[in-house]
Image: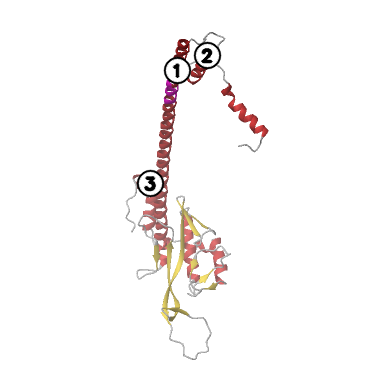
Amino acid sequence: MENRMPSTAEEKGPELIRIEQLKNLPPDFIPTRGADNQLIVKAGKILRTARTDDRHILRAPWREACLDIRVSKESLPRALRIMGNLIGLLEMERLTVTLDSAKSESTVVTAFGEQIQFGLIEKVRRFELPAAPPRSTQHARTLTFANKPIDFLPTGELSVQIWSYCSEPQRKVWRDGKRGQLESLLLQCVAGFMRIGLALRRHTEELRKEELEHQRRHDEFNELKQQIEAEEARVKQLEAAANNWKRAQLIREYVKAAETSATQRGAKTDSSSETRRWIEWATQQADRVDPIATTTPSILDKKAELARLQKMLNPWYA
């Protein structure tokens, strides 16, 4: 479960060296000063007067911030000692244990900048109850499973469990077993917390790199898109200018043809004639359309002024 190959940066780092050192320390190295920890003192006060649930496990009131110690009344003294010793070891490694009231699993240890949720749990065994007499006057609440009355029995078997998700296959549970009690596994627990902290840090770094790469691609996409849109706008302007130039040329050819026709009909084309005034006006319109010609002012240039005056006369005009 803990055989993942570390990265090159971690392979020579002090973290993995310290993890190996912890795993090789003797069990009697475990400090016993954890009982004085304020989180342990507070948890003891809360849980000694707490109620038990249907599984006979102590539950702290939801308004109380308390370590996640989910054990029976009988196992509480031992559980407090184990949790106190575990917190002492974690703090010795400069791993901070805090309570996050915003989470249902509120006990959090911070390892290498990553938050890891964990708790101390007692195993509970379910068993069937004998059927109640047909005319029983007992009104006590009875739990059922598959329509059979059941009850639960705390076994006294304790375990430390890590609840935070880890994408790597790391060990997350240490429990009482045939090879020894949980107390003898606390150094392994701390080493496991540190391994998961490193794994979460790797995952966070991978996510950060992926986010940076995504942002780089996003910026590259936007830059390319802006360049293409700008070029397309220039092409459209060019095409519009070319079309307007062709329109201007067509208007000038038409004006020339109209002047030739008027001359052939014998119409007056001197400077004071109506035909001449029309020729000059039409030529001006061609110049206005022509993108490379010098234009003269036109009444059509005052469209914006007309819209402004209309809005003053009627404010509701859109």
Q: Which residue is mark 2?
A: 275
Outermost residue to the right: 313
Mark 2 vs mark 1, CA separation in Å: 14 Å
- Give the quadrant of residue 216: top left
Q: Earlier in the sequence, mark 1 or mark 3?
A: 3
Q: Which residues are magenta?
A: 239-246
**x and y percentages locating residue 276 in the rendered image:** 53, 12
Taking the magenta stretch, the answer to whether it contains residue 245 is yes
Q: How many marks?
A: 3
**Residue drawn at the location 45% of the way across and 79% of the way down:** 144
Residue in the picture at 43% in, 63% down: 161
Q: Are marks 2 and 1 in contact (CB under 8 Å)?
A: no
- At mark 2, the secondary structure is helix
Q: Is residue 29 left or right of residue 62?
A: left
Task: Using the image, tell me which numbered label, if any, was put on residue 89.
Answer: none
Q: Where does residue 299 sit, x and y in percent of width and height?
A: 58, 22
- At 42% from the left edge and 62% from the top edge, which residue is drawn? 186
In the picture, the disc for residue 254 is 1
The vertical placement of 263 against 226, above or below, is above
Three-letter code for the amino acid on which mark 2 is drawn: Thr
Question: Considering only vertical position in the picture, is 48 above or below 95?
Answer: below
- The span from disc 1 to disc 3 (Cα, nearest Å) is 86 Å
Q: Name the magenta segment's main secondary structure.
A: helix
Q: Mark 1 or mark 3, which is nearer to you?
A: 1
Which residue corresponds to mark 3? Answer: 13
Given residues 287 and 172, the one toward you in this image is: 287
Q: Amino acid at mark 1?
A: Tyr
Is residue 65 shown left or right of residue 263?
Answer: right
Categorize mark 1 by other alpha carbons within 10 Å: few (<14), some (14-19), many (20+): some
Whether residue 197 is in magenta: the answer is no
